[in-house]
Amino acid sequence: MPLCIYLDGRYVGSREEANVSLFDHGLLYGDGVFEGIRMYHGRIFRMEQHLDRLERSARGIALDLPMTRDQIVDVLMETVRRTGLDEAYIRLIVSRGPGDLGIDPRKCARSAVYLIADKIKLYPQEKYDKGLKVITASTRRSRPDTLNSQIKSLNYLNNILGLQEATRQGADEAIMLNDAGYVTEATADNVFVIQGQSLLTSPAYLGLLEGITRGVVMEIGPRVGLKVEERPLVMQDIYTADEVFLTGTGAELVPVVEVDGRVIAGGTPGPLFRQLLREFRERTRWDGVPVQPAAQSVRTSAKLRAEAAAEPLPSPGR
């Protein structure tokens, strides 16, 4: 099975071997941070941005990373190398580490790093071809002044409650609002609206995570003739949109064709969404840090990243 797991110092190749201490505060209290990263065509997509966000999340909860960035990159590369995969999903977790049954993080002697590299398929192909049915969740997104949405923490209970609502109503996903009624994000993905030639998404200050894939879509929007704008959205903007879609590392870009029983884009994925998806998939062919064979791993991670950054960009027609 093309699966490899790094358990804070050792590699294992099966779920059964992937044992974590029952006293790990990531498990007991959700005290930790994580990143979901993709590898396409043997390249780690937007690796630097993911690691930047991981470091910001860790600083946000006063969590000391137990490894340098180069060490994390080395482990990441080795983990995906061991899978033998050319395309993979990578879950990078930093937990507060084992402690006692109290919540005091000072009782955790050292934070722990875990890494999973495996295949992923959040939705069947049918959903990308025909679109998602989405509802509005009554569960409100956590307020930024309680737990800032830019901290990608291990505690996803708020999102899970929203997804449970969608499941109970026979929908694929749920859009979550903040306490003022503005659109934040779906339970695991960012939300985009197309109105005419405008590509709209809510700003982060409303209480949503600034997704890496969200940022890529905002970069490529002008390539298909769209004007990108961040502005507060309400559900009326969703209901009256020409097209709606979600973005996330795991889901990539997935269209929405029904929201709260209202049909979007005639009930089929729209043409501009399809153009954005093509542009995104083309970008994943060249945008990223290549995973080197083990024999070449003597080169430092920093040098590998510098080499990737120095590669010439593809022509505008690519």
Image (spheres, rainbow, N blue to C red):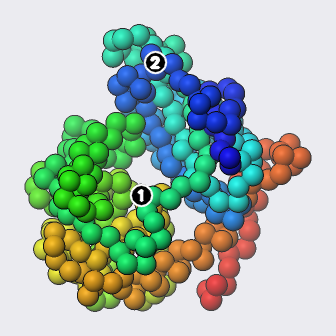
- Residue furthest to the left in view is 180
* Picture residue at 36% right of the left edge, 82% below the top: 269
Cα separation between marks 1 and 2: 31 Å
Residue 41: numbered disc = none
Q: Amino acid at mark 2?
A: Leu
> Residue 266's spot in the image, x, y percent?
26, 87
From the viewer's perspective, tell me whether residue 217 is left or right of residue 297: left
Disc 2 secondary structure class: loop
Q: Is any atom of residue 185 visible in this view? A: no
**Pointer 2 local density, CA inside 10 Å: few below 14, some 14–19, many at least 20:** few
**Pointer 1 local density, CA inside 10 Å: few below 14, some 14–19, many at least 20:** many
From the viewer's perspective, tell me whether residue 254 is left or right of residue 52: left
Disc 1 secondary structure class: loop
* Picture residue at 40% right of the left edge, 86% below the top: 272
> Residue 259's spot in the image, x, y percent?
20, 71
Q: Quadrant of the C terminus?
A: bottom right
Q: Earlier in the sequence, mark 1 or mark 2?
A: 2
Residue 263 vs 300, above or below: the answer is: below
> Residue 116's spot in the image, x, y percent?
59, 41
Q: Amino acid at mark 1?
A: Gly
Residue 65 vs 236, above or below: the answer is: above
Which residue in the protein does label 2 denote? 22
Toward the viewer: 104 or 227? 104
* Picture residue at 89% right of the left edge, 46% below the top: 295
Q: Are marks 1 and 2 in contact (CB under 8 Å)?
A: no
* Picture residue at 62% right of the left edge, 46% below the top: 117
Residue 211: numbered disc = 1
Toward the viewer: 25 or 300? 25
